[in-house]
Image: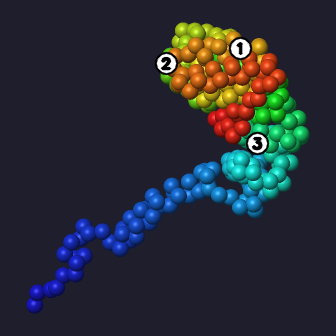
Amino acid sequence: MEQVQTPRQADPKRPGRRAYVLITLFAVLLVLFPVLFWHGTWFGRRLTDHDIDDYLANAAAKPRQAQHALVQIGERLGSSNLAARRWYPQVIEMTASPSIELRQTAAWIMGQDHTYAPFHDTLRKLLSDPAVMVRRNAALSLSNFHDDAARPELRAMLRSSTILSPAAGIVRFRLKEGLYVNPGTLVARVGDVEVRSQLPGEVRAIRVPDGSSVNAGDALADISADKGHVWEALRALYTIGGDEDLEDIQRYVRGVPGMPEKVQQQATLTLQAIQSRKKPSTALGAHVLGAQPLV
């Protein structure tokens, strides 16, 4: 009698049940991991009051979650949710964090309520922060308090910047002229020391030849002013700008290559606002409230 073969005997190369289980598990993980990543990193995810309390309390261990909490507080303030004021002391505490992201986000939030005096005092201190992005967010927020102390930093936002060497050694560039950089982009190495851009912008000029020897403090590269930073600075100067700011503003009134038309238009409005402030009868509206944080 002929033996009847089982399917496995008929096709010994066919995957077994364990293989199917592993394939299914792998497919589930492919879907699950992006969802978990989104859940942990997307700041648009709505947080409960309890979540915000927990995230702020655990800021030292998980600064990304604390930043999420700060963003949510800022959104509630933007929608005139006065209940968010209960977190004001924690917002101020975040300005002492070693995390640049937490400090700059806190600086942005404090500009949303210009009636709270402790915010004003804290923002003035942040103008001396070692991180330029923190200083710039603080300056924009201070403009909502109509504080002239913000103006030097606002003028700096209208100008190009120079990346300096942090150490002595042989420089090896990682970027070329014409490329765009974001905060944190690796620009060069000096010996074993990384040189990263603190600001966004286009690399306009490489100041020393690749492979040359440099000293600490030497200029390495020039970075153009970022269009987003220029736009926000012009809006802030609309409310607090003065005669000292006119030269920088007029350059954008004439038009700067690479800048969108709305920047030129805002520069014109800002120039007119500064000139009109000399006329007591002129009433001007603020064009900076609701501004976006710098990133």
Q: Are marks 2 and 3 in contact (CB under 8 Å)?
A: no
* Residue shown at the point (46%, 60%) measured from the top left: 31
The image position of residue 188, as x and y in percent, is: 58, 21
Mark 1 vs 3, N-terminal side: 3
The image position of residue 286, as x and y in percent, is: 73, 33
Residue under pointer 3? 112
Q: How far apart are marks 1 and 3 (CA)?
A: 27 Å
- On the rendered image, what quadrant is the N terminus found in? bottom left
How many residues crowd mark 1 within 10 Å: few (<14), some (14–19), many (20+)? some
Rendered view: 202 above or below 117: above
Tell me which amino acid carries mark 3. Answer: Gln
* Residue shown at the point (76%, 42%) measured from the top left: 112
Tell me which amino acid carries mark 2. Answer: Gly
How many residues crowd mark 3 within 10 Å: few (<14), some (14–19), many (20+)? many
- Color style of the picture: rainbow
Q: Residue 178 carries which label?
A: 2
Q: Which of marks 2 and 3 is in front?
A: 3
Left or right of 16? Residue 204 is right
Residue under pointer 1? 246
Rendered view: 43 above or below 278: below
The mark total stands at 3
Mark 2 vs 3, N-terminal side: 3
